[in-house]
Structure formats: structure tokens, C-alpha cells
Image (tube, rainbow, N blue to C red):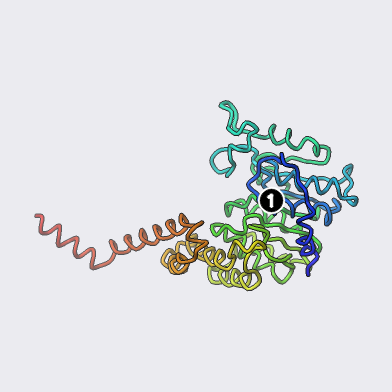
Amino acid sequence: MTKLGRLYSKFDSVTLPDDLPYTQVSAWELQFLYLVGRHELSGRGRIVELGSGGGGSTYALAMGLRENPAFDEKTGRLHAYDFFRVGKGTFASEKFFTSGHKPEDDNSFLNDFRGRLEPFLPFLEIHAGDLWQTSDPDDPTPVEFLHIDIAKTARVFRCVSERFLTRLEPGSIVLHQDFAGPRLPWLHHSTGALLPYIEIAGPPIRSTLAFEVTKPIPADVLKRISEDDYTVDEKLALITAVQNRIDRDHTDGIPFKSVLELAKAYVAHYDGQHKRAWSIAKPLTSDEYLSRTRADHFEQLKKAYDTERAAKSRRSPVARFKQLLVRGGKR
């Protein structure tokens, strides 16, 4: 059993407040965050949460840190990054506001967040805004813990990889909260590239994959990840490598082999290979979990394929000849 894997047996020992701030993270993931904070961290390196949202996950992690005798609240810091506002491109919910809806004159829930996290403000450092603007490209401090719940776009993931993954070292712990998201294949193929240097804790905790860095990660590997310097075929092979390491989540509810297979379709889709994307996705439409939870994904991929096929048909010599015949007949 891995070091992080030992935390799985402690789930039943965790009691979190009933009035925990609103979060889109499951109870199991919150418990795991608490356990990592309580048992695995010291604060000697950076403790970073990317995508703090309404504060539920931050609260659980901070609560664990406060109960951890190895963490010194006077010197240790929990760094919370988020837009802390709702609006286009933020992927935030109006439920993050204390009242449950956005005030007419303000789309920022930063004050709400501060209020909910008030007990931990002495060791909480908040970074509000676009991650490219709020993170320091020149900070070399090793990252002891990294909770990634912000990489919803390739642009943001590049920032995550350039400014945070490069600071991982043996002993660093990473939690990918969106690992059950097929539309975010950069999480999956980058993990495949890191496999020789990490130890996966065990089955994903619902949608979160947890791992610990066990060997120094070569700079050229990190550079390729941040620059997205892999061909489509290489990315598919890297995702396959991850599929060979994980199956279902710890509750047996999410079939990750199928989820990652659909992520492969999005690798091809984002590269403009819509026929290939649909050829990967189509067999998965019979998967019970995916058909129930990812119907919109299949619709998106099929629509892109149909649009591409129609465009090619219009450009074909036969189609152009038929168009000429029709035009000639109208004269």
C-alpha cells in the first residue's frame, strides 16, 4: 500500500462540520483533503489550492492543517487561488455567494469566501484573479502540496504546468480534482508522462486522482508537458498507460477506463480530427455510465464529425459537378 493509500482507511474517522461552505467537491474528496492536511503536510514547502471556489475544499484542508502538530500556523501558509467571481470563463457558480445568488452590483464572492474561512485567515493567503496574473513565474519555492481544480482550459493548464508542476519534488503530493472530466484530456496525458516519477495513491477518490512524486521529474518532461509537445498518437498512448494503472473509483461508481477512453476522443477532437474522435467515442455510447452522465459529450463530438463530413462532401469533385449540373439546368 502506498503512503497516501493508507489514508483511505481513515475516511470513517473524519467528521467535518455540517455547515461546511458550499462546494462542488464530494464528501469523500473533502475528507481526503482533511486527511492529507492532518497527516501528510508540514508547511515547509508551498501548500497550494488552485480553484478554491466557494471555500468548502479550502476549509477541509485548512481544518486538517490546524489539527496537524507538524504544521506551524505562524510560518506555514495555505495559498488559495481563484477568480473569486462569477462570469464568462470562470466556471464559478452563483451558489458560491452566501445568499445563493449574485448581487446585482457585484460578481465577486471574495468577501463571502473570506467570511467563511475567517477561522483560518491567519495562515491563509488568498490570490484573487487570473492565474497568469496572480501566480509568480519567478517563485522557485518547492510545492509540497498541489490541489488542482482550476485547469478547465488548456490555457490555464499551461500556467499550472509552467508555474507549479515545475516546482514539484520527491515527496510532493498532487490531487487532480477533475480527473473524471473527459473534456480535460491534458490532465490525463500529462499524468501519463509523469508515471515514471510518481506513485498513484490508489483508486481515484470519486473524481480526484491523488499521487505522490517519488523521483525527480526531468526538466525536459516538464517542458514537453507545458508546451503541449506531444503528437496525438503520443497523447493517446500516454492515456492508455494511465488506463493500465487505474480502473474504477474507490466507491466503484466511476469507470475510469471508459472515462479516459472518451478523453482520447477529445484529444483527436481538439486537434481537428473529428472523424477519428467520433470513431473513438461511438463505441462508448453503449457504456451505461457515460451514456447517462456524458450525453452532451457524445452530441458535441457527433455534431463536429457530421459538420466536417458535410463540408468535405460539398468540396468533393462529384458534389461540385452536381452543383454545376443544377446551375446549368436553371439557365
Q: Residue at point 73% right, 36% down?
A: 116
Q: Residue at point 83% right, 52% down?
A: 38
**Residue 163 located left or right of residue 259:** right
Instruction: Name the one closer to the observer, 41 or 229.
Output: 41
Q: Is residue 118 above or below residue 257?
A: above
Q: Position of residue 185 (x, y in %)?
A: 57, 61
- Asked where in the image residue 10 lies, by quadrant, the reply is bottom right
What residue did someone put label 1 on? 27
Q: Position of residue 33 (x, y in %)?
A: 75, 52
The local secondary structure at tag 1 comes to helix
Q: Position of residue 241 (x, y in %)?
A: 62, 72
> Is residue 84 in view?
yes
Q: Residues within 10 Å of mark 1 (few under 14, many from 20)?
A: some
Q: Position of residue 231 (x, y in %)?
A: 55, 68
**Residue 291 located left or right of residue 6:** left
Instruction: Name the one closer to the observer, 23 or 143.
Output: 23
- Image quadrant holding the N terminus, namely bottom right
